Amino acid sequence: MSLELISIGAVLLAATVVAAGLKQSFFITRSFFSLGVLFLLIGSMFALPHGTRGVELFPSGGLAVTFSLDASASWLVAWGLAPALFAGITISRSRISQGWYGGAALTILGAIGVAGLQDGISFLIAWEVMSLGGAFLLLNDRRASTADAGQSNLFMLSLLEVGSVSLLIGMLVLGSRDPSFSVWHGLWLGLSPLETFGIGVLFLIGFGAKLGVLPFYEWYPSAYSSGSGATGAILSGVVLNVAWYSLGRALLHWMPASKTPLLFGVLVLAAGVISAILSILYGFQQGDWRKLLSFSTAENGGLATAALGAAIMFRVAGLPDLSTLAWVVGLLHLGGHSLAKGSLMITADQIYETGGTYEISQHDALSRAPWTLGVGAVMGGMSLSAMPPMAGFVSEWFLFQTLFQAFRFTSSTGRVALALAGAGIALTAALSLATMIKVLGVGMLGKNQNRTPQRQTLPVDQKSRSLAVLSLGTLALVYSVGMIWWIRELTYASWIGPSQTVNHMVDGLLLVPLSSGFAFISPFLLVVVGGLLSLIPLALIRLRRHGINGYRKVPIWAQGLEKVPESSATTALVFSNALRQFYSFIYRPKTVAKSDGNEKGYFVKQVSFEYSVAPIFGPFLFSPIVRLVRWTSEKTSKMQMGSMNVYILYIGLMLILILAIAIFI
């Protein structure tokens, strides 16, 4: 049943690409896309907990191209497609072309192929389709000028191609004799530990380019800001999920534990933690909804990568139960992240529709939007900042409990690495909370004095968008509260330990890290108790309405002023400037203030103020590479002199080289 639904969904998405290319009715294109995503989502859900059976798609050069989704892939695809479904339904028709749906369909088809194809050749094709589909998606979003969108996409594709080349090299080494994934574990056993380490690094670079592992997260802000929040919901959902799943499949399924050095697990752990810290540090400084949320996506990709690093370390140490725990924690984290990030990405589009800008500023968004927008956005922000009882709270609590198992290691290397990772993730959690307070507090609250704060009749698309935000935020809550039931769908989601490991993560109404004697939480009971405690303030409000005075109204504090002037409103820079100065050794902040006046300078006509933070890897890594390529092209351009004699000389040298290779090699 699940395979049939997935097949129907894939056919509908292919029809979306055709309809978009032929510029058919916008309604038909949107319907094909929405139905295709819905069928894929339901099919992936039905595949749990065992996954789908393998099915041969077609023979190709003696190789049978097969497709199957295991439990881990089904879980990540299903939750990743939920925001994609709402994004496709709610995106403003006036802001995009039909090509957007074609790009979105290609991206999702590529992602499904990455998650389910079982040989290296078809996998690489699906990976490229997913990348190029994402670029096509961004170019058809019409949120940036053609020049800016093109430059952002070229930067994104150039970094992704670095990853693709790394994947190609690694897969050529493993699959030179047989490209089928089923035999790669056995083939890897014949390699030395040094070769294992090298191939592992290639896969970390290859998949990390899409995940945003440093330094690749630097393509995120420019690419995301050239598109809409709906585009960001797709890139932060199913695309991010399948990239992480592929990295886990390579490092936990194909790579044999006997050949994996502990230091490689430490490398993956460190890459994830450092990426998360740097991403959220830079996300906190952003003044654009999409840029801030893009860095948040890279942060959560880093947290999931840290969980994968811990899984590798536990596996090498001979602790399969803890390795399975760490892997499942990554699955839980990315599933909840997809829902929460989708709610805020679609919220960004609503802010743009009502305020005309993605800028994080006080322009009374809530006073001109349905209550559903505020509630859904707050729940999404709570989840991304790991506030109870939301999905992010569950997964990050599990991640901390996994890292606290460092005492199980006999070597000091593992203990110190997990302890430092725990400290880094604690810093990330604190910064993430401040970031979500900034984007929701500054970006949605406040009062713009230039507007009349009155509710107006909203268009249907804005109402549906607000409902989509509420739906995704509510799903993030349901995801957490129902985890005592949902987690059993991951019983067979590990390649490492026994299937009963996941069952030991639940004890009645409690979530536990394999043992209730170590630690426990219960989001279900938190919601029940929280609901009962909420009766107290509700009763006080009720009594107040009946004339019982118990509080007084006072103006808010604003630097001692009795009345809050518009000029003292909190801006995105004011909110984050303290941290900007504290971490100036990372940010290298730059502030430029200029004033233009008359000749004597008595009367100021214009004041301009600009502030920025410098990227870490741009000046020290990417810029030197660009200069090297330009210098090389200038030098080699002299070879094209237009002289026939020189070209004949080139051909002669090539023939001599070919003969030498044929004779001596």
Image (cartoon, grey):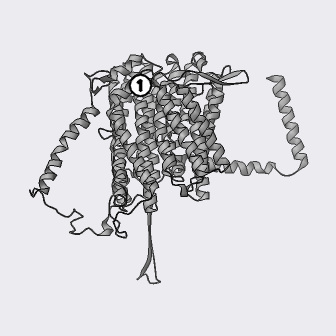
Vertical comparison of 347 with 514: above or below: below
Q: Position of residue 401 (x, y in %)?
A: 32, 28
Residue at 50% in and 42% down: 84
Residue 72 placed where, x, y %? 47, 27
Q: Residue at x 88, y 42 (%)?
A: 649
Q: Is residue 650 left or right of residue 560?
A: right
Q: Which residue type does callout 1 highlight?
A: Glu
Q: Is residue 536 at least partly visible in the picture?
A: yes
In the picture, measured across the screen, residue 28 lies left or right of residue 465, that is right
Q: At numbered mark 1, what does the secondary structure look like: helix, strand or loop?
A: helix
Q: Nearer the viewer, residue 16 or 447?
A: 16
Which image quadrant is residue 658 in? top right
> Which residue is painted at 42% across and 40% down in the image?
339
Relative to 641, say whether 305 is above or below: above
Along the viewing direction, whichever of 358 and 373 lies nearer the viewer? 373
Where 440 sits versus 48, above or below?
below
Image quadrant where one finds the C terminus: top right
Closest to the observer: 70 or 271? 70
Asked which quadrant contains residue 516, the reply is: top left
> Mark 1 packing: few (<14 Cα in 10 Å), some, or many (20+)?
many
Task: Identify whether 485 is placed above or below 107.
Answer: above
Residue 143 visible, this angle: no
Image point (57%, 18%), residue name: 185
The residue wearing badge 1 is 489
Report the label total: 1
Q: Position of residue 476 (x, y in %)?
A: 37, 39
Residue 336 % position (x, y): 40, 37
